[in-house]
Image (cartoon, grey):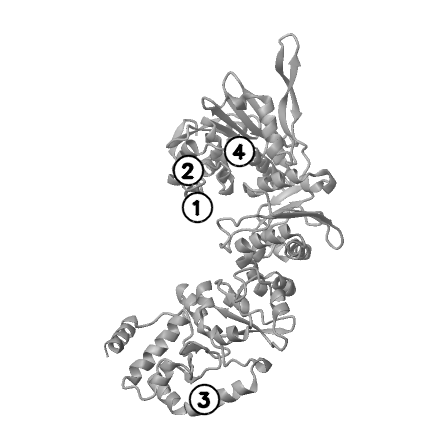
Amino acid sequence: MTQKQTHAFQAEVKQILHLVTHSLYSNKEIFLRELVSNASDACDKLRFEALDHAELFEDTPNLEVRVSFDEAARTVTISDNGIGMSAEEAIAHLGTIAKSGTREFMAKLEGDQKKDANLIGQFGVGFYSGFIVADRITVETRRAGLKAEEGVRWTSEGTGDYEVETITKAGRGTDVILHLREGEDEFLKTWRLKSVISKYSDHISLPILMKKEEWDAEAAKQVVKDEWESVNKASALWSRSKSEITQEQYDEFYKQISYDTEAPLAHTHNRVEGRSEYTQLLYIPKKAPFDLWNRDKRGGVKLYVKRVFIMDDAEALMPVYLRFVKGVIDSADLPLNVSRELLQESRDVKAIREGSTKRVLGMLESLADSEDVADRAKYADFWKDFGQVLKEGIGEDHQNQERLAKLLRFASTQADEGVSLADYLKRAKEDQEAIYYITADSLSAAKNSPQLEIFRKKGIEVLLLTDRVDEWMLSHLFEFEGKPLQSVAKGAIDLGKLQDEEEKKKAEEAAETFKPLLDRLKEALKARAKDVRVSTRLVDSPACIVVEEGDMSGHLARLLKQAGQAAPTSLPTLEINAEHALIKKLDGAAQFDDLAQVIFDQAVLAEGGHLEDPAAYVRRVNAMLLG
């Protein structure tokens, strides 16, 4: 390629560039963080590739990032001597976006946060942040290992297209030259650029160099020298002693690696020695990311080996249910050329994963069990955003199931949120033999379920479970501290010692007295109900439907259907309240079959289910109202 070639941007890039140049006004300095971070990543990638191909270092083995400016030309340049790009890579990386988060990124920008430039990095489009302050960007690059004459110049004004041409570039790596817009002269000052680098990039383990500036007494002004100096500490934050690091530095590092705008909820920083030697710096975010529910999303932990960057998103280092955790793990034991495949099989990685999991759970436990009201409030906020994901661990992490069970929080008939299983047992009746729960589509549906009536009458607390993951979780969590978990909507209710002998005797007598009625109802409802029996759980409602132990609940069946999956077909059992006026009216009713169907339909609706033939229900009710 010798001539200039013009290429059109991918459609999504055009939209992003338009939004970047017209909508992002706040915190413009973020562009420097992004471009320095990209330059650092390029150096990390070269260092990694050079493990097997040392010749890629050419004649400059020392990796560095340089930041400079030209006041006359009104340009800011960020240079690195990292891996660089070939012509094909420049077109692929700078002209298209392969990230799946593009649509969400644009939706966020067009929403309430449209002026928040911090969103840029979160969606993998950090390079384009340069257009916040520049009306033209020139990129000059050469991939390590290619000839000097195979350099590439990429130029764009951030509109509909960009130009690419071949140039001669002696040194490998990339120079990003920003031609500043009018009004952005603040970034043509050494002190301003230094302050931004210090704020966002101080932890980067490569030297970030700028030209020295000294006071010239004769000229009575600061003069830029030809000598370069490092403007960052160039030491990995996690490798420093905890006593040397301020909370502000921890928070800034978190924002740098997570692209979050808020400080984290909590962090843990430890050096672990023993069978495996590693350093971990792990963070729990305050708010859930937009892609939290994507279980295929890569984890948020970066892997380093002896401070050499190996890979982003090392999912083998953290279980899937802790995919919201961000941070860095730096191992002293893993081989420098470790691959994703080796990570999956390594004993050392398994030890790191187990140790890091326990550390994160320990952080959560310290918040949840703290005597400090503020810490407990933090955990309550965490639970609202991440609780459903943490519940996945009950089935995925048997080793830590007991610890996770103590961290669970629910609504109950006594509180709308924040009830732990330990709290429940403290309030349980003296002779209570089980932890009772009900699953439903919503809190309102759970609270008003007829199946709760006997429990409410006797003052027995019932947990109200309304998250989609709850049914799956309950298939793995059978007991807590020796007490079984029992659904109030499954099987016949046996309250044991909490039900007095008189109540039991009364129920047995009712079952005998109503046997002819039960037989007629079974016949009328044989296509819809497995059985009909007198209820011991109803107080005010005429009827309810329950499923037998071992059968799928109606709530889970509905969830499967909503997900497009086939649910096993099993008929429920109808329980009737022998004391209710409507049930008494059934005996001898002229429209017995229709009334039986109406009572069953009402029981389905009260349970939160959907009628297969709503029109038939309406016809029957109207006929009765008219009759």
User: Alpha carbon of mark 2 to alpha carbon of mark 4: how far?
Assistant: 16 Å
User: Alpha carbon of mark 3 to alpha carbon of mark 2: how far?
Assistant: 71 Å
Closer to the camera, 116 or 224? Answer: 116
Quadrant in which the N terminus appears: top left
Q: How many marks?
A: 4
Query: Depth-wise, is mark 3 or mark 4 nearer the camera?
Result: 3
Marking on residue 510: 3
Residue 426 appears left or right of 12 = right
Vertical comparison of 574 with 73: above or below: below
Query: Who comes first in sequence, dot 1 or dot 2?
Result: 2
User: Alpha carbon of mark 3 to alpha carbon of mark 4: how far?
Assistant: 74 Å
Per the image, the residue denoted by label 1 is 104
Closer to the camera, 66 or 24? Answer: 24
Amino acid type, callout 4: Ile
Query: Who comes first in sequence, dot 3 or dot 2?
Result: 2
| Residue that appears at 51% across and 54% down | 296
Per the image, the residue denoted by label 4 is 30
Marking on residue 16: 2
The location of residue 354, given as percent across then percent down, is 66, 57
**Is residue 519 visible in this depiction of the protein?**
yes
Within 10 angstroms of label 1, few (less than 14), some, or many (20 or more) residues?
few
